[in-house]
Image (cartoon, rainbow, N blue to C red):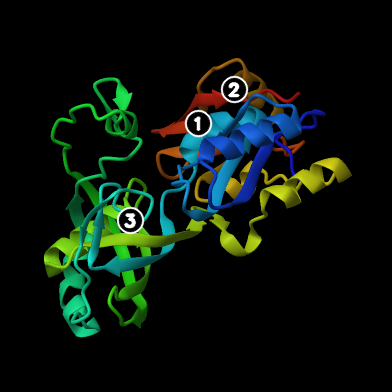
Amino acid sequence: MAKLSSGSGFEGFLNLDKPAGLTSHDCIARLRRVLGERRIGHGGTLDPAATGVLPVAVGRATRLLRFLSEGKVYRATVRFGLSTDTDDLEGNILADAGAADLNLARVQAHLPAFRGTIFQVPPRYSAIHQEGERLYELARRGAAIAEIAPRTVEIRALTVLGWYAGHYPELQIEIACSTGTYIRSIARDLGAALGTGATLAHLLRTRSGPFALEASLPLAALEAHVQAGTLPLIGPRTALAHLAAVHLDPLLAARWLMGQKVPGDGEGTFAQIWESETERFLGVATCEAGSLQPLVVLPPL
């Protein structure tokens, strides 16, 4: 069990296996009740129907969510011959003609256009803000939605895992992508390119940054750990492993904790800061030429 400090409260990260049927916010609300801690947040929304890895920060670790490494991996099932207003099976059907004649060779011929750096328009039912409201809020009450600007995303890998023929043929794929990618948009756009229409039938997130599905735990298991006093909190050394770790001697650490810039070298934009003698985590710095500027300071409890 890892903590950010020696305090008695819950602090750190959890690797939650989100169930279908709950929003990411629902999961956070449930954990707040179980842990008795208001400061809980997640690192990347999953749609209610989607399952899999949802990184969760507890206590002061919520201040570190923005530093989690980018990159997510999904397993998705695309269903052809059907289009919906949400771009998944949760929405209203817009077109239903089937696609029994579609074959894998035709689909594969279009897949290169969905690899690399691409532009995609987010779904109308998404958490993106427009005019001060989330798009799904506007869509649900039938409000007019202005044209949604396309976004640049990176599809680092798109691999075919399976093909299932039928009146509504399905393609199972694995996608490694940048943060902000909408898999529903890929399903929709692939169906449009083929002229059959398509929607997302199933989505499982298998990795988000350093958090992997095989190490994730369902809500019930986390609740049981809380009752047993064995909650498997993940510390910053693991959660922020992609950032360089800089160790400060006690004098520099004291200056750091007062918000002062201190000398030190770090690789990249940000660095983890630790006290060398006690191995206490102190926060995150921005790395400048020969110095470390405090960005998030977490005094030991």
Number of the front mark, 2 or 1: 1
Q: Earlier in the sequence, mark 3 or mark 2?
A: 3
Q: Is mark 2 in CB contact (under 8 Å) with mark 1?
A: yes
Which residue is disc 1 drawn over? 285
Number of the front mark, 3 or 1: 3
What percent of the width, then of the height, locates residue 117? 21, 57
Using the numbered discs, state the Cα–Cα distance from disc 3 to disc 1 in whole angstroms.
33 Å
Which residue is disc 2 drawn over? 256
Q: Amino acid at mark 3?
A: Ile
Q: Earlier in the sequence, mark 3 or mark 1?
A: 3
What percent of the width, then of the height, locates residue 66? 46, 35
Q: Residue furthest right?
A: 228
What mark, if any, has residue 96 been given in the picture?
none
Which residue is disc 3 drawn over? 183
Q: Regarding mark 1 in the picture, which secondary structure is present there?
A: strand
Q: Could you tell whether 200 is left or right of 278 in the image? A: left
Using the numbered discs, state the Cα–Cα distance from disc 3 to disc 2 in whole angstroms.
42 Å
Q: Amino acid at mark 2?
A: Trp
